[in-house]
Image: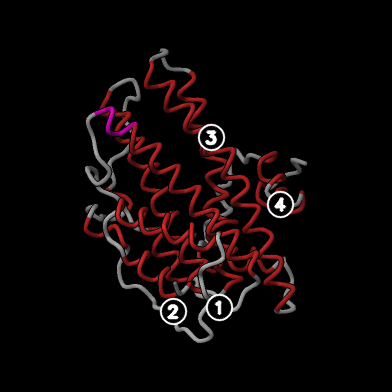
Amino acid sequence: MNFYKELELILESKNPHAKIEMFNAFYDFYKSGHVEFEKEFEAKKFAHPSYISTCRIVPPQDVPRRSNLTTKEGQIVLLHAIAHIEYSAIDLALDAAYRFFHMPKSYYDDWLEVADDEIRHFLMLEKLLKELGAEYGDIEVHNALFEASQRTQTLIERMAVVPRYLEANGLDATPMILTKLQRLPKSEMIGKITDALKIILDEEIAHVKKGDIWFNWACANENKSTESYFDIIQKYYPQGFLRAKNLNADARKEAGFSCKELNFMAHKNIC
């Protein structure tokens, strides 16, 4: 089994469960040492996200907003939004392994492990959606995460933007959602959603940490300062740190962010 070609086939699979089955088979081969790295391979730049046949893609402002989380409809909207992030994150992790050639094996170990985690997160959320009578694809989605992967075609930019910016933002957002859930009247579904989000939050710290490690590696490999991080984010997200609120400083520090970075993002000394 060839490493990059098989990842390309998995990335191009448009059926979520077929994609997951293909990845599981591939990952078993990889962990057993039966996958060969091609000596030459040219990665594709994909024109469309793999979920294009499953979900209706709309501009971010047209995605349904979260409503009353005590209702089934509000819970479906919340779960679908997070499930879409996790499904997109599967492809983001796979693309990180697929796109960057001749990296240390530990790099591929890391991003395939992340993909495996994201699959587990997606399936966990999909199960809750089904308990509510819904399916992934029932609600409109945006493709901002896919577009971020398409715009960042160097390792330094990819590691800065995807794990260290977009995924790190989730470390800030998830505790706010958990706080809202904790204020609601207790119910079995609210408890299940809360438990799922706590698992995701805990495991996403390690994903951001992997991005931090490989961002630093890429900077050292190209003799660039790690302070280029803010220039990269400014390039793609000019307003990115102007609205930085409710930073989860403890989680971000665990994931590799320095106090200097956190103080800059918060516009004040927070650590």
1 or 3: tag closer to the N-terminus = 1
Of residues 209 and 268, the one nearer the viewer is 209
Q: Which residue is mark 4?
A: 256
- Residue hosting label 1: 101
In the image, what residue type sits under mark 4?
Answer: Gly
Residue 76: x and y in percent read: 29, 32
**Is the residue marked by circle 2 packed among few (<14), some (14-19), or many (20+) residues within 10 Å?**
some
Label 4 to label 1: alpha-carbon separation: 25 Å
Query: Residue 186 location, x and y as percent?
Result: 42, 13
- The numbered disc on residue 199 is 3
- Quarter of the view holding residue 71: top left
Measured in 3D between alpha carbons, the distance from the residue under mark 2 to the one under mark 3, in whole angstroms, is 33 Å
Name the N-terminal-most of marks 3 and 4: 3
Q: How many other residues sit within 10 Å of disc 1, few (<14), some (14-19) or many (≥20)?
A: some
Q: Are marks 2 and 4 in contact (CB under 8 Å)?
A: no
Upstream in sequence: badge 4 or badge 1:
1
Q: Are marks 1 and 2 in contact (CB under 8 Å)?
A: yes
The amino acid beneath tag 3 is Ile
**Bounds of the magenta span?**
128-132
Q: Secondary structure at mark 3?
A: helix
Image position, residue 118 (x, y; %): 47, 48
Of marks 2 and 3, which one's residue comes earlier in the chain?
Answer: 2
* 254 left or right of 206 in image: right
